[in-house]
Image (cartoon, helix red, strand yellow):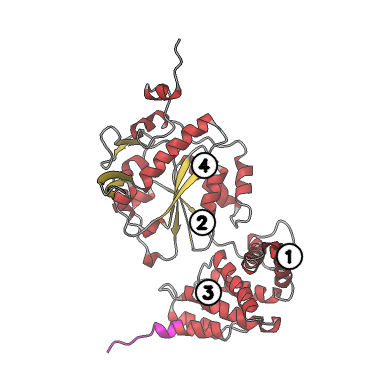
Amino acid sequence: MPNVNEETLVEQGAIPPTEFHDKIERIREIAQYDIDSPQDLTARLEKATQGLLISPETLRSAAAALRVGHVVLQGPPGTGKSSLARALCEAFHVSTFPVTAHEDWTVFDVIGRLELRLHADRKEEIVPVNGYFTESVVRCANAIVRHFDDPAEPQAEWLLIDELNRAHMDRAFGELFTVLGTDAALPITLPHQRDGNRNLVIPRRFRIIATLNSFDRQFVNNLSQAIRRRFTFITVDIPDKRPMGATWSNTANPAPLAVQEYRTVVERVASRVAKRLTSLDTSRTQQETSDILVKLKGPLAALVGQLFDLIERVRYSGPDQRVPHLPIGTAQIIDTLELLLLRMSQDNVALEGAGDILDWAVSVKIVPLFDTDVVAPEVLKEFASTLSAPFDKATRRALLGIVAAGMHFVE
């Protein structure tokens, strides 16, 4: 019997190709394989999300939703939605194709288009260019076959869409409504591809994980019911309020999620600032991190606690309170403390002056978040009047500046 090489078997259809860009219609051959959930998925999820402030319930919900279909992680800015998306992919042993949605997206950006290319010899050529969705599906098919050959390879590649509601999804997704809403192997037509390479079937192992800012609704586009029906929405929120009597410096384990956030912020700030200060001499980074941690947990601990107290006031204010409600994310707290430490280092500020620097950091990092239509000016003004040291100077002035900027008269 003559030897038959792999290329011949691929061409004869005996085995699927390992590269589908020019063989898109053959993706149908591997489309029936669904997600292979690792037996140690729980352990993989815990490992992948170490350092993330995600409740166990949110984590389990997101994992279950991904086993069923496409997922949207929604919540306020800075709560770790994008980090959770990447961690979920790591836990499921898949690679990612990340993109950021844009208000100018059309079906040409999502599905594909024809482009005129000019070669080095000055010759022009019209070539097909896959859109984000099409390209990610083709890459997913390639990954599936590689995984069959070598289980150490990712089992799929998933499309990660950041800020989903920045785009006009009903306009951009077009024909995808049909294929995203069914398990049937229905092909979509790719008009930008050549004949014989136009019918795309979506593998059952393919997923979209999108993130959605649920707070700045006045600056984003609404998602239609048709889009919403094709995704499972998982909320990634700020940590639950600190239990009565619990202190920020509580060393108990396990600790409430709010206290875990405090610990995580301190550790992450120390690491980030140390790397910035020792970028030219990384041999000092570890020692610098330790020195910063000593400051944050010692002489600066009271100020850090006051910052968290301030954040707590606005995070969990109720409708009957004269305090503006804002779900401030963990990322903004980290940025504020990073500003504090770097400004102190830059200006050679002694510990006695740290309060004024923290006041400044809050005024330039946290206060701008209040400049939104969802906060009433009178509530903001009253809140500013209640601030005490160290937030009674720059922070108060910045808040009152927002109130003043919003006042206008029509004659």
Q: Secondary structure at mark 2?
A: helix
Between the C-alphas of marks 1 and 2, the distance is 31 Å
Percent coordinates x, y for residue 210 in the rendering: 44, 52
Q: CA distance from mark 1 to mark 4?
A: 36 Å
Please tell me how crowded label 1 is: few (under 14), some (14-19), or many (20+) other residues with Cα within 10 Å: few
Mark earlier in primary sequence (2, 3): 2
Q: Nearer the viewer, mark 1 or mark 3?
A: 1
C-alpha span from label 4 to label 2: 17 Å
Where are the magenta residues, as a range? Answer: 402-411
Label 1: which residue?
287
- Point out which mark residue 4 bears: none
Q: Say what secondary structure mark 1 lies in.
A: helix
Q: Residue 226: image x %, image y %? A: 33, 49
Q: Amino acid at mark 4?
A: Val
Q: Residue at x 44, y 36 (%)?
A: 142
**Amino acid type assigned to the residue bearing label 1 in the image:** Gln
Mark 4 and mark 2 lie on one chain; the one further toward the N terminus is 2
The majority secondary structure of the magenta stretch comes to loop
Circle 3 sits on which residue? Answer: 365
Tag 2: residue type?
Lys
Residue at image coords 44%, 61%: 214
